[in-house]
């Protein structure tokens, strides 16, 4: 082969690989941004990174129609526009789904996310403590419709979940905020990392996400 | 280029693409098997497919040290060897983690999985009802160590989570089974699909997964 043919062949290989990588990324969320992964020795930054990079998780509430059993539900969320995470998870929920109804009866809520969907765990099992997981426990509150916070939260949500903008008006989707009271972060062996709400919200941790 | 060169170039392209597809698959679970997706009009088969294809989810229990708040935790599971799903989710848990401790105090447990990690939702948002989600609610029970069921369950778990075999012996991992009492399946618009436990476990639904 001459040099020109070799260059063309390389281009085809690169193009095909690029298409495959893009396809892989789009099907599994925002994996392409995960190169910002902070050092796990910095628990607050690591937790903020997990919250900023993920786009969905499981919200657990108390099911009053199942004798008070816990009930987990898959929900999407956003803590801010990409690279501008606030650490506060906002949700767009309808009371047609049980989770919002349960939370209106009993606000106690936990929200759980995994590092696994980001693609940065590689071949490590999702239950292995080095594939991080974070559980935020607190109270779910409806954000006042039309308030500055609601406008900001909608921007945050729609920037990561474009289709939400067009979800049916007659389903009465409303913005909810999780007011975090406890954090449970596993990002290595040795049990949960000590991490307070104040540490999690320190501005310097936000800075690490830029 | 002569024919031999073209064949070699094609082989390189195919090999590189194969490696990328395999890598993509391993980082995000068993997405490569998801072409078996049943028709969503068959709720029992669809639920069994979601359980058989997924490898991890969020287990929600009642946190007795957080005033009875719900607590979600990322866990791996298996309902059988690949293509031999039983519909029963088995887990490999240690009481070093709070979830197993909570379940030993109050067995009420829900286990939530999403279709999103399988890659079959495409660009549809994880909260969109056409990207399916399933919540199994019931009681978590420890499987008797050394029993036939425990041996079978370990085979099921280790076939999908190879590294579990080598998890630290001094962490006392034990096999747990979720005894399902209620199913909450969303796989399209219009609210949860009517689905009983008996329908879910009908042998014909298992057959659809082969």
Image (cartoon, coloured by chain):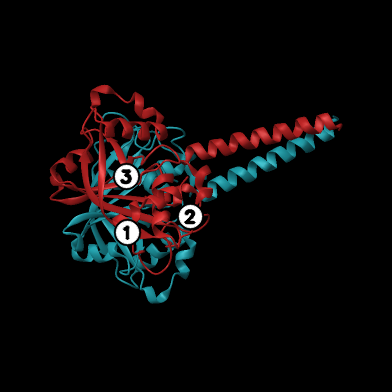
Chain colours: A cyan, B red
Q: Nearer the viewer, residue A24 or B151?
A: B151
Q: Residues within 10 Å of mark 1 (few under 14, many from 20)?
A: many
Report the chain holding disc 3.
Answer: B
The image shows residue A198, relative to residue B16, as above or below, that is: below
Residue at numbered disc 1 = B184
| Residue B179: x %, y % from top left | 24, 47
Q: Is residue B87 left or right of residue B142?
A: right
Q: Residues within 10 Å of mark 2 (few under 14, many from 20)?
A: some
- Can you see residue A88? no
Say yes or no: labels 2 and 1 on the same chain: yes
Q: Which mark is residue B38?
A: 2
Q: Residue at the bottom extreme?
A: A170
- Can you see residue B70? yes
**Mark-to-mark CA distance, 3 and 1:** 15 Å
Residue at numbered disc 3 = B88
| Residue B148: x %, y % from top left | 27, 31
Report the chain holding disc 1.
Answer: B
Q: Nearer the viewer, residue B142 or A189?
A: B142
Say yes or no: labels 2 and 3 on the same chain: yes
**Mark-to-mark CA distance, 2 and 1:** 17 Å
Report the chain holding disc 2.
Answer: B
Displayed quadrant of residue B165: top left
């Amino acid at each position: 082969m001459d040099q020109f043919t070799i260059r063309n062949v390389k281009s085809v290989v690169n193009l095909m690989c690029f298409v495959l990588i893009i396809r892989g990324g789009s099907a599994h969320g925002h994996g392409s941004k995960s190169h910002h992964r902070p050092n796990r020795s910095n628990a607050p930054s690591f937790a903020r990174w997990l919250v900023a990079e993920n786009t969905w998780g499981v919200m657990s509430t108390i099911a009053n129609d199942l004798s008070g059993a816990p009930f987990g539900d898959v929900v999407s969320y956003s803590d801010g526009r990409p690279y501008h995470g606030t650490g506060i998870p906002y949700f767009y929920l309808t009371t047609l789904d049980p989770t919002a109804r349960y939370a209106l009866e009993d606000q106690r809520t936990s929200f759980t996310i995994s590092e696994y969907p980001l693609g940065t765990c590689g071949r490590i099992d999702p239950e292995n403590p080095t594939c991080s997981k974070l559980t935020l426990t607190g109270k779910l509150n409806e954000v006042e419709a039309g308030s500055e916070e609601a406008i900001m939260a909608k921007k945050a949500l729609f920037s990561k979940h474009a289709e939400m903008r067009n979800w049916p008006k007659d389903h009465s989707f409303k913005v909810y905020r999780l007011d975090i009271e406890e954090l449970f972060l596993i990002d290595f062996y040795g049990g949960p990392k000590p991490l307070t709400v104040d540490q999690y919200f320190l501005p310097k941790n936000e800075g690490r996400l830029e």
